[in-house]
């Protein structure tokens, strides 16, 4: 008899818990899988998979874009060699992927998009928008983000444009994947982190806010920037989502040992003082989305930080659900590969979520982890890749 993936996992966990008292197991319930996790896009010698953006097209295909050669493997010598990455396409809800041509976009601006991540969004006017992080040399690894639009479902794109250059200096700005949001009013929000002047890169000390547009992306303004008082790393890599009452939640990583939140009652222009949430997390990645039923779901690494302000561990990958953005359900396990209470060996980070009829398609990055203690070797850079799973929608 062939065991299903969830049943087999439960059996293995039970054996670990009761057969060997020295083995520690995670106290989380497993997600219900339509398709279990698996690597579908391996890392390559000149590229690592990280920061994907995904979107479903009207014909049902899933389109995905991921940056070239970005952290945790820098590949400095390749910056500028691959200014525009290849698309990936899936015709079976993300089970398998085919690499396609490079994105058809004029790139006539400084910097490259081989860092950070991508966000797709189908706008109210029917266009497909794409926002990406922009790496500018000698700029703390950041730069003002870029935006482009497609009117033919990604076949062609308008020339890339820099966001916010009228209102902000082109210095250490950062945007990660799956971030672009359009509010009920039509306003576009691009949540961004900014390296605090005088600090190092974004992971050192950051403040967060949004670029916002009320004219379909023609012009942009900058919101208030906030960070938690006294936090070791400030507020970085924010995500935003709108609640039914119109309020906007901003959720971000920090150095407090958990995710932090901030609230806006004016559509993302001003923000409340950030506060800790109950979502345990080092200063590592997260992705916040609104489920089709209106609830919020966040994917993140629910684990105790190695030390105050640490960027590690980055495993396991879980999700939690909330109806109001204030109280969250228990973490639900998506990927625990490499989890070890003493020495984690994997980073499971930067998930992109695409809602399809049969469930939630989740695509994330899996990397060898040494907790940032040394530069990864070429062999270590090849461990892992782009992973995907299809999860059943969370029960109410």
Image: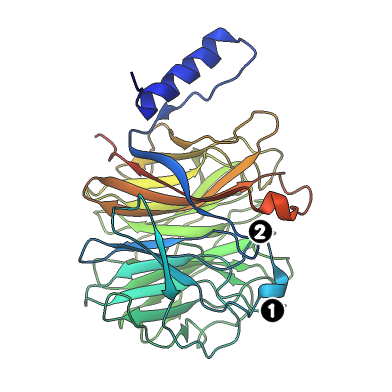
Q: Is 255 positioned to the left or the right of 390 in the image? A: right
Circle 2 is placed at which residue position?
203
Callout count:
2
Q: Is 358 positioned to the left or the right of 113 in the image? A: left
Q: Residue furthest bottom?
A: 108
Residue 327, quarter of the rendered image: top left
Residue 232 can be seen in this image: no
* Residue under the image location 44 percent in, 53 percent down: 287
| Tag 2 near tag 1, CB within 8 Å | no
Mark 1 Cα shell of 10 Å, populated few (<14), some (14-19), many (≥20): some
Colouring: rainbow
Residue 360 can be seen in this image: yes
Q: Residue furthest right?
A: 374
Q: Quadrant of the C terminus?
A: top left
Say which mark, if any, is on residue 275. Answer: none
Residue 155, quarter of the rendered image: bottom left
Where residue 228 appears, x then y in whole percent?
58, 54
Q: CA distance from mark 2 to mark 1?
A: 17 Å
Label 2 residue SS = loop
* Residue under the image location 26 percent in, 80 percent down: 152
Q: Please state which of residues 169 and 388 is positioned toward the viewer in this rendering.
A: 388
Circle 1 is placed at which residue position?
137
Residue 347, quarter of the rendered image: top right
Where residue 215 appears, x then y in whole percent?
30, 83
Q: Nearer the viewer, mark 2 or mark 1?
A: 1
* Residue under the image location 23 percent in, 61 percent down: 60
């Amino acid at each position: 008899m062939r065991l299903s993936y969830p049943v087999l996992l439960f059996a293995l966990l039970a054996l670990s818990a009761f057969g060997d008292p020295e083995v520690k197991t995670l106290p989380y319930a497993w997600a219900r899988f339509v398709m279990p996790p698996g690597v579908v896009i391996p890392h390559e010698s000149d590229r690592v998979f990280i920061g994907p953006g995904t979107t479903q097209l009207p014909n049902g295909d899933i389109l995905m874009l991921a940056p070239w050669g970005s952290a945790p493997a820098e590949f400095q010598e390749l910056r500028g060699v691959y200014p525009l990455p290849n698309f990936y396409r899936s015709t079976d809800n993300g089970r398998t992927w085919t690499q396609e041509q490079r994105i058809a976009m004029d790139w006539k601006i400084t910097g490259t998009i081989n860092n950070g991540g991508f966000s797709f969004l189908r706008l109210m006017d029917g266009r497909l928008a794409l926002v990406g992080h922009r790496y500018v040399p000698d700029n703390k690894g950041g730069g003002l983000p870029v935006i482009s639009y497609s009117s033919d479902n990604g076949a062609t794109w308008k020339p890339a444009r820099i966001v916010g250059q009228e209102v902000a200096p082109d210095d250490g700005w950062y945007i990660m994947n799956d971030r672009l949001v359009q509010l009920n009013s039509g306003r576009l929000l691009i949540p961004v982190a900014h390296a605090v002047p005088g600090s190092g890169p974004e992971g050192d000390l950051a403040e967060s806010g949004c670029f916002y547009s009320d004219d379909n992306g023609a012009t942009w303004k900058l919101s208030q920037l906030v960070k938690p008082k006294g936090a070791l790393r400030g507020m970085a890599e924010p995500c935003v989502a709108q609640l039914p009452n119109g309020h906007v939640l901003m959720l971000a990583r920090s150095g407090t040992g958990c995710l932090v939140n901030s609230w806006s009652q004016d559509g993302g222009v001003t923000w409340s003082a950030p506060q800790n949430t109950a979502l345990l997390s080092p200063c590592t990645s997260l992705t916040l989305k609104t489920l089709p039923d209106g609830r919020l779901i966040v994917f993140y690494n629910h684990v105790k930080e190695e030390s105050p302000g640490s960027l590690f561990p980055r495993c396991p990958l879980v999700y939690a659900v909330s109806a109001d953005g204030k109280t969250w359900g228990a973490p639900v396990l998506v990927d625990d590969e490499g989890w070890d209470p003493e020495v984690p060996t994997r980073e499971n980070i930067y998930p992109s979520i695409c809602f399809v009829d049969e469930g939630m398609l989740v695509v994330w990055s899996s990397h060898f982890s040494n907790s940032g203690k040394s530069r990864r070797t070429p062999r270590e850079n090849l461990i892992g890749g782009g992973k995907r799973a299809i999860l059943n929608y969370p029960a109410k």
